Image (cartoon, helix red, strand yellow):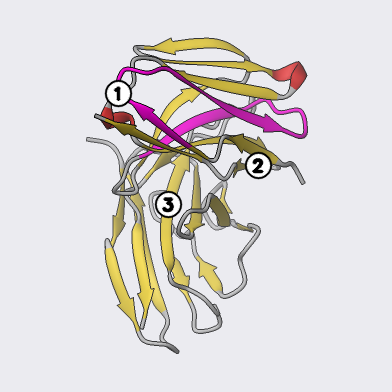
């Protein structure tokens, strides 16, 4: 079955540690996205990538880094510079169409807790 | 940037009732989607609806792009409809989300 796989589902981290969240898709989608969701809040964009080896910052990129070396993979690293990293992280992908019809498909999410 | 506002923020219904959720956006868009987030956090795409009306079972959606709003209708609500409903619009190559409407359907 095609879809998006995020791992790990739950992650605990000590302050000062970097962690990397994995996102893999087998949908052959061009674009991939990382969103952050805080309790009771909407989704805020961290980074997105339209094609391999290219990515752009979203609204809250500070303290995060990404790479897009392969079409199917878009890992997110939460660095020690992120001041409040405890949150629910969602990865999404879409086919990039000129018409703007980018229908998003989401992974199941990764919940990061900083101890 | 574009503003996406959803109302109401919270909604409590008795099973079987109907409801209407609203999404207002501040600029012209050519891509609007409705999502349902279940209690476990999974987001499911309900509709891609930049304009017009679509129906899928008990759910339907209408977008009036010229007036910059979209409505999601839920009829004969069930407890499994509980969760958070988000609308999102395409802006500068990324999807911008509203804050959501939290729906609770009581048996």
Rendered view: A96 above or below A7: above
Going 65% across and 41% down the picture, which residue do you hit? B93
Q: Based on the picture, tell me whether residue B33 belongs to the magenta stretch.
A: yes
Q: Between disc 2 and disc 1, whose residue precedes?
A: 1
Quarter of image, res A1: top left
Going 61% across and 66% down the picture, which residue do you hit? A61
Q: Secondary structure at mark 1?
A: loop
Give the foreground label among 3 and 1.
1
Image position, residue B69 (x, y; %): 67, 24
Chain letter of mark 1 equals: B
Q: Main secondary structure of the magenta part?
A: strand
Q: Nearer the viewer, residue A70 or B33?
A: B33
Rendered view: B20 above or below A59: above
Residue under numbered circle 1: B15
User: Around disc 2, counting alpha carbons within 10 Å, would you say few (fewer than 14), some (14 to 19), or many (20 or more)?
Assistant: some
Residue under numbered circle 2: B93
Which quadrant of the rendered structure holds the C terminus of chain A? Answer: bottom left
Task: Using the numbered discs, state the Cα–Cα distance from disc 2 to disc 1 in whole angstroms.
Answer: 39 Å
Task: Using the numbered discs, state the Cα–Cα distance from disc 2 to disc 3 in whole angstroms.
Answer: 16 Å
Residue under numbered circle 3: A91
Image position, residue A73 (x, y; %): 39, 55
Side of B75 relative to A34 (left or right) = left
Image position, residue B75 (x, y; %): 39, 15
Rendered view: B102 above or below A13: above
Q: Is residue B79 visible?
A: yes
Chain letter of mark 3 equals: A
Image position, residue A29 (x, y; %): 44, 39
Q: Secondary structure at mark 3?
A: strand
Chain letter of mark 2 equals: B
């Amino acid at each position: 079955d095609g879809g998006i796989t995020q791992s790990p589902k739950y992650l605990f981290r000590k302050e000062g540690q970097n962690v990397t969240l994995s996102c893999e898709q087998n949908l052959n989608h061009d674009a991939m996205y990382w969103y952050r969701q805080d309790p009771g809040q909407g989704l805020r964009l961290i980074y997105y990538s339209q094609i391999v080896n290219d990515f752009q910052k979203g609204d809250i990129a500070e303290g995060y880094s990404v790479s897009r070396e392969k079409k199917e993979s878009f890992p997110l690293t939460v660095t020690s510079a992120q001041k409040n990293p405890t949150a629910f992280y969602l990865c999404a992908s879409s086919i990039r169409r000129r018409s703007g019809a980018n229908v998003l498909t989401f992974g199941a999410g990764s919940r990061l807790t900083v101890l | 940037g574009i503003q996406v506002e959803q109302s109401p923020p919270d909604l409590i219904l008795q099973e079987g009732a109907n409801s209407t959720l609203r999404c207002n956006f501040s600029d012209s868009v050519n891509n609007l989607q409705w999502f349902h987030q279940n209690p476990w956090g999974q987001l499911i795409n309900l509709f891609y609806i930049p304009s017009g009306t679509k129906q899928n079972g008990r759910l339907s959606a209408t977008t009036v792009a010229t007036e910059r709003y979209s409505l999601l209708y839920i009829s004969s609500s069930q407890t499994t409809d509980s969760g958070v409903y988000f609308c999102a619009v395409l802006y500068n190559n990324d999807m911008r989300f509203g804050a959501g409407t939290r729906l609770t359907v009581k048996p």
